[in-house]
């Protein structure tokens, strides 16, 4: 199979065709996944190889085992997480986890920065970068993390910040894998947590090779250009974190940026209260964070109708399905140093919107840029010498819950009754 479709795109829908030849590695495939065929059956990417050492096989997609996937998606994700939690670990995995934990704890204690660099040329021509330990006060191994589906999984290493509203703030997850091949479905759930996820490649390692020197080189290697063969890490970022970590220069992005949030009426007041409480908890004034609800009180309010139409398209084409009469606008100071209270607000807001609410999010930071939709990906672009250069995604939400429900309904029409499981959502 030469082509597949992204199950979750920037538009939150099955719409982007992907060619197997355009994918360079398992890590790149994971950035695009989960992937499905035209019948919404899950597929996986296969790299080029020599079969039996002689017959060349080019890059392609293949269906995943029928019995394994003859369930709808929500149940499958839960099954994958349960399976991972029940599996034991080998000596290489165990030693690496211990060495990384001690190295991270030492860096936290001595306030050592661990810079990382990533890229996504489709979404932005600028690099994505940050400090793995920014605002981190503690590392924990085998920490249980609750997913948006209501099931827990054990992260190899979880990074936590200070207590916010009686909870330790989750700031990052480190997973130890082989060839960065952890399941697409699990990656989808990780995105919903709204934190960076770092995958460390253990392929080809022996227990004797895992030393303090190897551990520090692996952590320091996160600042190597993505794609370099010496790099043993891969970083997965949800789109909601791009406004923090995209290195867009001044004055293209100035001192503030804007988030447009569409949420259904049942959750509108609760989300508004959560954002206000977070702002107050972090002692941020209106110059740092301004949270404002916008309501169309009367159908005849033409000015508000025009405003809704202009900002609705920034959140996504289905914004009216979420709320056709009101939205929340959040205007924030850009946390250029990627630390401090403003930075924490952005991280918590991303986690809140991803994991706990079904929302659409639009992003705006420069009214002189234009939106390029020619490739199906809504991206803010700058025109340079007649060509459009991608700067930043327009839509930030990756709506997992409604997508699971839709795929579940499709699956119920395709699979025999005996293979149907109750949807976890």
Image (cartoon, rainbow, N blue to C red):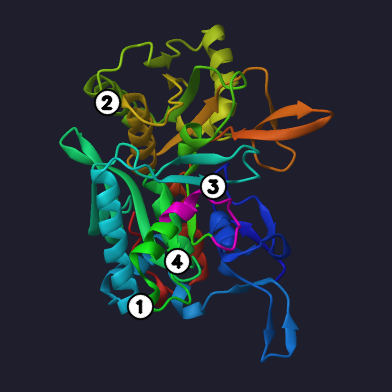
Q: Does 279 sit left or right of 41 as displayed?
A: left
Q: Can the viewer see residue 114?
A: yes
In this figure, which residue is indicated by the disc labeled 2?
278
Query: At 59% across and 26% down in the image, what residue appears?
Result: 249
22 relative position to 353: left or right = right
Residue 156, quarter of the rendered image:
bottom left
Give whichever of discs 3 and 4 has the lower sequence position: 3
Q: Is residue 77 visible?
A: no
Instruction: Kindly indicate whether the residue at mark 2 contacts the one at mark 4 (C-beta within 8 angstroms).
Output: no
Q: Position of residue 285 (x, y in %)?
A: 31, 12
The earlier-in-sequence mark between 1 and 4 is 4
Q: Which residues are magenta?
A: 219-230
In front: label 3 or label 1? 1
SS at mark 1? Answer: helix
Q: CA distance from mark 2 to mark 1?
A: 45 Å
Residue identifier under label 1: 207
Up-down: is 384 above or below 103? above
Q: Is residue 80 magenta?
A: no
Within-10-Å neighbours for mark 4: few <14, some 14–19, many 20+: some
3D distance between C-alphas at marks 2 and 3: 29 Å
In percent of the image, x 39 and y 31: which residue is there?
A: 264
Compare marks 2 and 1 and give the one earlier in the sequence.
1
Q: Nearer the viewer, residue 322 or 213?
A: 213
Q: Are marks 3 and 1 in contact (CB under 8 Å)?
A: no
Q: CA distance from mark 4 to mark 2?
A: 33 Å
First reached walking from the N terminus: tag 3 or tag 1: 3
Tell me the crowding category of disc 3: few under 14, some 14 to 19, or many 20 or more residues within 10 angstroms, Cα based. Answer: many
Question: What secondary structure is marked by label 4?
Answer: loop
Residue drawn at x 25%, y 58% is 102
Q: Is residue 340 above or below residue 61?
A: above
Which residue bears the numbered disc 4? Answer: 182
């Amino acid at each position: 199979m030469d082509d597949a479709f992204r199950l979750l795109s920037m538009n939150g829908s099955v719409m982007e065709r992907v060619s197997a030849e355009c994918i360079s590695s398992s890590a790149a495939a994971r950035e695009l996944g989960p992937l499905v065929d035209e019948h919404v059956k899950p597929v996986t990417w296969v790299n080029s190889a020599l079969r039996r050492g002689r017959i060349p096989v080019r890059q392609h997609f293949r269906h995943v085992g029928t019995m394994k996937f003859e369930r709808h998606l929500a149940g499958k994700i839960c099954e994958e997480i349960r399976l991972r939690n029940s599996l034991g670990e080998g000596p290489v995995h165990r030693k690496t986890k211990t060495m990384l934990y001690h190295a991270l704890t030492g860096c936290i204690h001595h306030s050592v920065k661990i810079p990382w660099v990533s890229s996504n040329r489709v979404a932005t021509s600028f690099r994505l970068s940050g400090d793995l330990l920014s605002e981190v006060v503690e590392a924990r191994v085998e920490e249980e993390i609750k997913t948006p589906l209501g099931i827990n999984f054990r992260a190899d290493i979880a990074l936590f910040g200070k207590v916010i509203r009686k909870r330790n703030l989750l700031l990052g997850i480190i997973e130890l894998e082989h060839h960065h091949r952890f399941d697409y479905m699990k990656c989808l759930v990780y995105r919903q947590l709204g934190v960076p996820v770092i995958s460390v490649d253990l392929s080809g390692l022996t227990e004797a090779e895992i030393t303090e020197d190897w551990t520090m080189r692996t952590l320091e290697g996160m600042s190597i250009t993505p794609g370099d063969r010496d790099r043993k890490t891969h970083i997965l970022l949800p789109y909601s974190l791009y406004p923090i970590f995209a290195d867009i220069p001044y004055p293209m992005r100035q001192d503030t940026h804007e988030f447009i949030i569409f949420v259904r009426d049942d959750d509108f007041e609760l989300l508004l209260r959560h954002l206000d409480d977070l702002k107050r908890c972090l002692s941020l004034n209106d110059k740092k964070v301004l949270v404002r609800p916008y309501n169309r009180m009367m159908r005849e309010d033409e000015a508000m109708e025009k405003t809704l139409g202009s900002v609705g398209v920034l959140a996504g084409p289905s914004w009216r399905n979420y709320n056709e009469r009101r939205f929340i606008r959040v205007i924030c100071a850009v946390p250029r140093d990627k630390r401090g209270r403003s930075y924490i607000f952005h991280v918590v807001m991303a986690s809140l919107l991803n994991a706990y609410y079904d929302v659409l999010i639009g992003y705006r930071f420069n009214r002189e840029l234009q939106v390029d939709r020619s490739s199906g990906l809504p991206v803010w672009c700058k025109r340079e010498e007649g060509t459009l250069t991608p700067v930043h995604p327009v839509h930030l939400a990756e709506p997992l819950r409604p997508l699971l429900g839709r795929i579940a309904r499709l699956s119920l029409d395709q699979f025999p009754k005996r293979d149907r499981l109750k949807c976890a959502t």
